[in-house]
Amino acid sequence: MNLKKMVGYKAAEFIEDGMTVGLGTGSTAFYMVEALGRRVEEEGLKVTGVTTSHRTTKQASELGIPLKDIDEVDSIDLTIDGADEISEDFQGIKGGGAAHLFEKMVADLSDEVIWIVDESKMVKRLGAFPLPVEVVKFGHGQVKNLFERKGLNPQIRLDQNGQKVETDSGNYVIDLKLEIIEKPHELAAFLDSVTGVVEHGLFLDCVSKVIVGKTGGPEVIEVMR
């Protein structure tokens, strides 16, 4: 049973006619976009998508989902996206696909955010998944040095050919291998203060629903803030 497909298709059921929808990036969000494409074709569902990566833009366009740039909309009704880790108090780490800058900008403009994951992504505390930090190319080595002095165990992300990964904005990614993040809000504030940091993968206090893929079926969790 493909748990990612299960939750992706379940999430697409929350999309209503007339909505402006943020379309996430990643292996689970791929199935949500696929399911939405089917609804657009088979049901005549009228929606406007705002994508979070070039990959999602390509997929949604091929499926006939109408799209607008983020600057062409006033707000977004609902964003559906994956996550790399979700803690028991529903804070998240995203950016395994290096799309967290666009993902956060879309999420921040959204009235509601749904995360879709398989149950392996649900953890007690964040940190086992390396925390992605997008940095500008200029001086990125100095930013890495700062992170090293702070004991954040940074590593510049490389692709399978050993080349530095570039985001859709042409920046680099430094992954912080922390194991446990004791105080995510304090860490987020520190990262926000570092010159050269474009965005980080801590998504805090923003999700309203989590759909978890389990062998017995998808579980929808309402998050109370």
Image (spheres, rainbow, N blue to C red):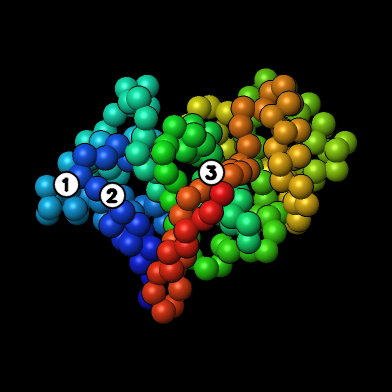
At label 2, the amino acid type is Ile
Say which element carries label 1. Answer: loop
Vertical relation: 208 (above or below) 122: above
Q: Which of these two is toward me, 83 or 20? A: 20
Q: Earlier in the sequence, mark 3 or mark 1?
A: 1
Q: CA distance from mark 2 to mark 3?
A: 18 Å
Q: Residues within 10 Å of mark 2 (few under 14, many from 20)?
A: many
Identity of the residue drawn at 85% across and 43% down: 151
Cα separation between marks 3 and 1: 27 Å
Mark 1 vs 2: CB contact within 8 A: yes
**Relative vertical location of residue 165 with respect to residue 169 in this rendering, above or below:** below
Residue under the image location 56 percent in, 49 percent down: 225
Q: Left or right: 2 with respect to 90?
A: left
Q: To which quarter of the image does residue 143 belong?
A: top right
Q: Secondary structure at mark 3?
A: loop
Q: Locate residue 199: give its quadrant.
A: top right
| Residue, disc 3 | 206
Q: Name the spot of residue 60 as percent of width and height, x first.
A: 28, 42
> How crowded is the residue under tag 1: few (<14 C-alpha within 10 Å), some, or many (20+)?
some
Give me the disc on residue 15: 2
Q: Amino acid at mark 1?
A: Leu
The quarter of the displayed image where residue 75 is located? top left
